Image (cartoon, rainbow, N blue to C red):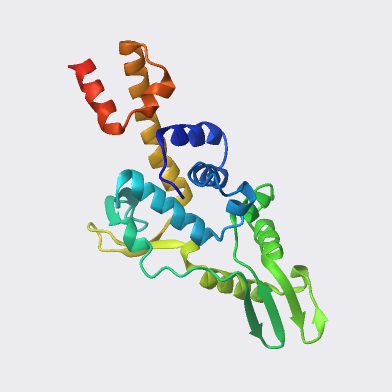
Amino acid sequence: MSPLTSHGLLDAWEWGQGRGPTARALAILAVASPESGWEELAALPLGERDRRLLALREELLGPRIDGLARCPACAEDLDVVFDARDLQAGAVAAPAESRLSMEGLTLRFRPTGSHDLLAVQGCSGIEEARLRLAGRCLLEAWREDRALGVEDLADEELAVLADAMAEADPGAELLIELRCPACGHGWWELLDVASFVWAELEVQVRSLLRDVHVLARAYGWREADILSLSPRRRRIYLEMVEA
């Protein structure tokens, strides 16, 4: 995986317009991993996908992450600052397959990937999406000597399966512990890595497009020539134009 270039960043951003966070996450990874096919990237466990996104983001912007959260108890807004490296401390890669046994029931399943999230986007509701997602990730189910489908599982068994899938790929749900300084309430906030990284990269793209606009007007350079400049050289030219 290579660092994001200015060209790659713009290509991913342009392709991702009008698409959802899952497709946008894959677009970012695709420009940074040209040696990997789309299907290969889409099959990555979500924990590994998000680890790669955070690594690319850190390479571009550094490890510090600034965010904003709202206290669910008193609705106070609070600034959140944390280190992206802490999110990956002790990260464990999800196994290709896992097995779960309980009360005569045996389940074999794989971790959720981006292709699974894309496949359930058209579902009419959360319950349908959960059932379809479980059906895609469930490789095999047996009750004693009888093979089962996902539709044969009881609600509580589906819930146990969902918990086991989350435990097998803990990086797929990154939780940040927060405490409100106003009321003292503490809670866990889920970090949607794909949406968060995209939002930050979009700010960088807007700044990059402005740089291209200013330098193209001042010097008549082509976009490709401007993007080929290192960020430091580009900044020096901008400072001279704006002096």
Indicate the position of residue 19 as horizontal and vertical percent values.
Answer: 57, 38
Left or right side of 144 for 194: left
* Residue 102 position by quadrant: bottom right
Indicate the position of residue 224 as horizontal and vertical percent values.
Answer: 43, 23
Q: Residue at (46%, 70%) from the top-left corner?
A: 92
Indicate the position of residue 226 as horizontal and vertical percent values.
Answer: 37, 23
Question: Up-down: is 132 above or below 61?
Answer: below
Residue that lies at the very extreme toward the left in this rendered image:
243
* Residue 163 position by quadrant: bottom right
* Residue 99 position by quadrant: bottom right
Indicate the position of residue 228 as horizontal and vertical percent values.
Answer: 38, 28
Left or right side of 165 for 82: left
Residue 192 visible in the picture: no
Camera-nearest residue between 170 and 178: 170
Count of numbered labels shown in the rendering: 0
The quadrant of the image that shows the C terminus is: top left
Left or right side of 203 for 146: right
Residue 240 visible in the picture: yes
Left or right side of 6 for 106: right
Q: Residue at (42%, 68%) from the top-left corner?
A: 91
Question: Up-down: is 135 above or below 226?
Answer: below
Q: Residue at (25%, 32%) from the top-left corner?
A: 232
